[in-house]
Amino acid sequence: MARTAGSHSDITGPRVREAALRLFAQGGYAAVSMRAIAAEVGVQAGALYNYTPDKQSLLFDLMEGHMTELLAAAQDDAKLPADERLRKFVAFHIQFHHARADAVFIAYMELRNLTDDNFARIEAQRSAYESGLEQILRDGVASGAFQVSDTKIATLAIIAMLTGVNTWFRAGGRLSLEEVTAQYWEMVRRAVM
């Protein structure tokens, strides 16, 4: 299939992913057609298949890319006290996800649209991220710094709470992202100590 005149694969490929990310976040995966993605990019629908085998692969690539970037960016220094590690996790999670609101929305809301194999791969990445937080909580319990009866439930509750910032926070609002992060840290701290 011929590319649209003036298009370049190193430019069009990323534009396809950006358009799909934006459209999936706005209208949902099921409602977005390959034709709509092509129109957004300014190429013929058939040209999309030069960049992705199908819509499912595109969704998976977006989710996997987000999770890979998240796992690569997440840092934990086990030498630090557990409360400092947890404070750093809270700040990292809020700031990382705030900068990627569409990717976060898709990573959480479109899991149901993945094939079983793709779901298992994304779920493994999510579990790896969650395990990092759970280890911080376990270490805090072991050192006596935290009072948590079930670290798995606490892990899931903390992540859900922190990810929720994306649903309501807007830059230019009453509080800055730093102020929101400080308040969320205080809520998390009180929940585990």
Image (cartoon, grey):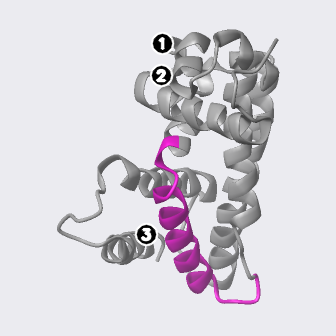
> Local crowd at mark 1 within 10 Å, few (<14), some, or many (≥20)?
few
Q: Residue 184: percent from the left, percent from the top?
A: 37, 69
Q: Earlier in the sequence, mark 2 or mark 3?
A: 2
Query: Which amino acid is tagged 1?
Result: Ala
Q: Earlier in the sequence, mark 3 or mark 1?
A: 1
Query: Which amino acid is tagged 2?
Result: Gly
- Residue 28 magenta: no
Disc 3 or disc 1, which is closer to the eye?
A: 1
Magenta stretch bounds: 78-102
Indicate left or right for 105 with 138 as reference. left
* Residue receiving disc 1: 31
Q: CA distance from mark 3 to mark 1?
A: 37 Å
Above or below, 70 relative to 177: above
Image quarter for residue 11? top right
Image quarter for residue 155? bottom right
* Residue receiving disc 3: 188
Q: Residue 65: percent from the left, percent from the top?
A: 72, 44
Q: CA distance from mark 2 to mark 1?
A: 6 Å
Q: Are marks 2 and 1 in contact (CB under 8 Å)?
A: yes
Q: Residue 168: percent from the left, percent from the top?
A: 29, 50
Please identify the quadrant where the N terminus is shown: top right
Pick the front one: 182 or 99: 99
Residue at 42% in and 22% down? 27
Q: Assign a secondary structure to mark 2.
A: loop
* Residue receiving disc 2: 28
Asked if one can make out residue 26 in the rendered structure from this viewpoint, the answer is: yes
Pick the front one: 63 or 12: 12
Q: Assign a secondary structure to mark 1.
A: helix
Image quarter for residue 179? bottom left
Above or below, 21 relative to 186: above
> Local crowd at mark 2 within 10 Å, few (<14), some, or many (≥20)?
some
> Local crowd at mark 3 within 10 Å, few (<14), some, or many (≥20)?
some
